[in-house]
Amino acid sequence: MHLIIKKILCLALVIFIITIITILIIFNCQTTHDENTNPIEMENIMIHPYDDSPKYNLAFYTCFYGVKSNIAFKIPELPSNNYDCYFFSNNTEMLLTLKFTNWISIFDDKPITTDEVISSMNSKHLKSLPEDFIILKKYDYLCYLDSKVKKINETFVENLIKKYFIDKNYALLIRTHDFLKGFVWDEYKESMLQSRYRSEKHKYKKYIKEQKNAGLSETTEKHAMTGFLIRNMRNPNTIILDKKWYTHIQKCGIQCQISFFFIKQMFVNDILIFDESPY
């Protein structure tokens, strides 16, 4: 009987020793792994296992200027839940409505008027020269969209930034026109279907002729729509381009697709016109 008890105790002691040795081996291996792991990598593993933070220092922005009866009095669907999305307006009723959305509303203290041309020119300033607005200066990339456009695909914008800004350093990306080809007078004729553009038709004719006399062409390979723009604010040519375009808008008038028709000829190495849909 005593012999059996001794054997059981010896077996238990052996199992205990084996267990302790196994625990020590496992602990030692884990410690060695931790010591050989880069602290930064460990931080990424431990703190950001499912990191969905924004990829770029990017902001989206749009605007509305004028009275509520203006057909442009619309709030587009928020283009992103990951990036800052700004809505500029001088209309307090619009700003109150924006409180029920996730847009960041910005009051632009410009007089409200029923004159569509004046209201449109206010929006052209923000559209063509965003660096004049302090809150937008902190971003590396800016995406402008008209208030009437469909929901923008955030991933599409991110992919274009990588492909054409980071890899190729373009200054501005813009979409090709849906149906008009590269003839500026076709844009002029299409514009005459809208009263606000008809009121400035003499300015457009004069401007187009001036650009032709300056050596620019009435025809190009592609025509672009200015309702969706992506800017590379890290490229120093972007500010030069923007200032030039705004100057031309002031000469031409509110139909900024006519003025951009000639601007793109001045910055052929900085502007890319893409065909893909951003929606």
Image: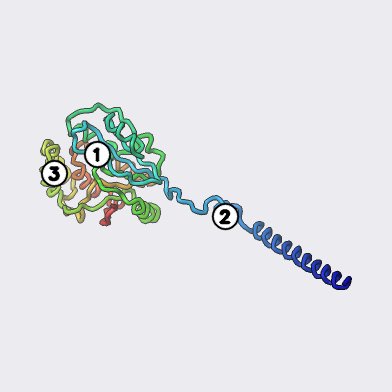
User: Horizontal and vertical percent for residue 261?
Assistant: 20, 47
Q: Which residue is drawn at 26% across and 48% down?
A: 150
Q: In which quarter of the image is residue 86?
A: top left
User: Horizontal and vertical percent for residue 199?
Assistant: 11, 36
- Amino acid residing under circle 2: Glu
Residue indicated by mark 2: 41
User: Horizontal and vertical percent for residue 102?
Assistant: 36, 40
User: Horizontal and vertical percent for residue 127?
Assistant: 28, 40
Q: In which quarter of the image is residue 255?
A: top left
Is 186 placed above or below 18 here?
above
Contact between marks 1 and 2 (CB within 8 A): the answer is no
Residue 27 in the figure: left or right of residue 135:
right
Residue indicated by mark 3: 191
Residue indicated by mark 1: 74
Residue 134 in the figure: left or right of residue 31:
left
Q: State the scheme by which the image is colored.
A: rainbow
Q: Which residue is drawn at 26% across and 36% down?
A: 64
Q: Which of marks 3 and 2 is nearer the N terminus?
A: 2
Q: Observer-nearest residue: 167 or 39?
A: 39
**Closer to viewer: mark 3 or mark 2:** 2
